[in-house]
Image: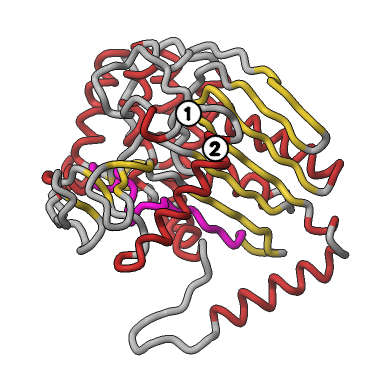
Amino acid sequence: MDAIHQVVSLSDLDRFCRQILAACGANDETCEATTRAMMHATRCGVDSHGVRLLDHYVKALEGGRLNKTPVMKKASGFGAVETLDGDHAQGAVPAYAAMKKAIELARQFGIGAVGIRNSSHFGAAGAYSVEAARQGLIGLSFCNSDSFVRLHDGAARFHGTNPISMAVPIAGEDPWFLDMATSAVPFNRVLLYRSTGTTLPEGVASDAAGLDTTDANLTEMLAPVGAAFGFKGAALAGIAEIFSAVLTGMRLSFDIPPMNGEDMKTPRQLGAFVMAILPEAFGDRATFEAGMKRYVETLRTSPAREGATVMAPGDREWKVASHRNAHGVELDPVTRQAFHELSGRYGVPMPA
């Protein structure tokens, strides 16, 4: 296969990311969590939040925006609630730690919620909610980010893409799994479309005047999810903002330095929030599992429009994950070039 369409294995991508992060001086916990989060996204087909972010994270680690050797600590707590100070780590580091703690709290109290302070970009929110679902709990995760999404009928950036994710266990199956930006698309998707020369769908992006555009190169802001009913998406972004930033005392979206700005020295002070819920705290486990089974089975077999297929949230991601586990993934041109440069800089062999 020619280099333009080179497919690489997930295992070798994982190896490459870990070795590059270690070579730039990140500690073991940072290498593990950052790679784990990126690989979750790449495996599930969320390429905008996958290994293409490695180059950005390395720049932020080398520049000082991200702490290579963070020492996280409990900032506060009350019953089933805690707040974790992430010490300006790469965002996946405190996010995985917070979900682990939320699961522990949920096993004790039935529900556990952990706010995260002094964090940074954590990639795909679903990486953390699915951790709870894999252990039999319902998981939720939220984060805010720098302003890039206009309000409904707005003509200026206001919210970040502010993701919301929820994952629910299904006995004997992959989880019911939602991971969505509250913008019509995440900005990393726009960057991916720029890289591949792909035209954007209608109604997802705006130019500098707030007018719709399908040109990824002219995109200056994103539209909230909901199109003509974008007030719904803007309000959902507000939910993520309140959980992530208001509760934790972190910067609001319009106060956060831009992710892709020139300053790679100043910590961004993002907030995040995760929650875990133990289903059997509300009733017996068997009733919960039977209800989820019947729900998704009835959903998948409900009538579909001609030529279409009805899927439960997560079905597409798990299908992509199965294929990529077996066959690998093709890197986009910009990511491939960035990998070549990282490989040469740090003396780490390219993924094969």
Q: Is residue 121 left or right of residue 137?
A: left
Locate residue 295, reporting x and y percent. 65, 76
Locate residue 103, reporting x and y percent. 74, 41
Q: Is residue 188 visible?
A: no
Near mark 1 (Cα within 10 A), the count class, few <14, some 14-19 or many ≥20, is: many
Q: Quadrant of residue 93?
A: top right
What kind of residue is marked 2? Ser
- Residue placed most toward the observer, 74 or 347: 74
Looking at the picture, does residue 339 appear above or below residue 185?
Answer: above
Circle 2 residue: 244
Q: Quadrant of residue 175?
A: bottom right
On whether residue 156 falls in the magenta region, the answer is no
Q: Which mark is residue 270?
A: 1
Q: Is residue 157 left or right of residue 39?
A: left
Locate residue 58, reporting x and y percent. 36, 20
Mark-to-mark CA distance, 2 and 1: 8 Å
Near mark 2 (Cα within 10 A), the count class, few <14, some 14-19 or many ≥20, is: many
Question: Helix or strand or loop: what does disc 2 sit on?
Answer: helix
Q: Residue at x 49, y 41 (%)?
A: 241
What kind of residue is marked 1? Leu
Q: Is residue 164 visible?
A: yes
- First to last magenta residue range: 175-191
Q: Residue at x 37, y 36 (%)?
A: 51
On whether residue 186 falls in the magenta region, the answer is yes
What is the quadrant of the C terminus in the image?
top left
- Residue placed most toward the observer, 335 or 57: 57
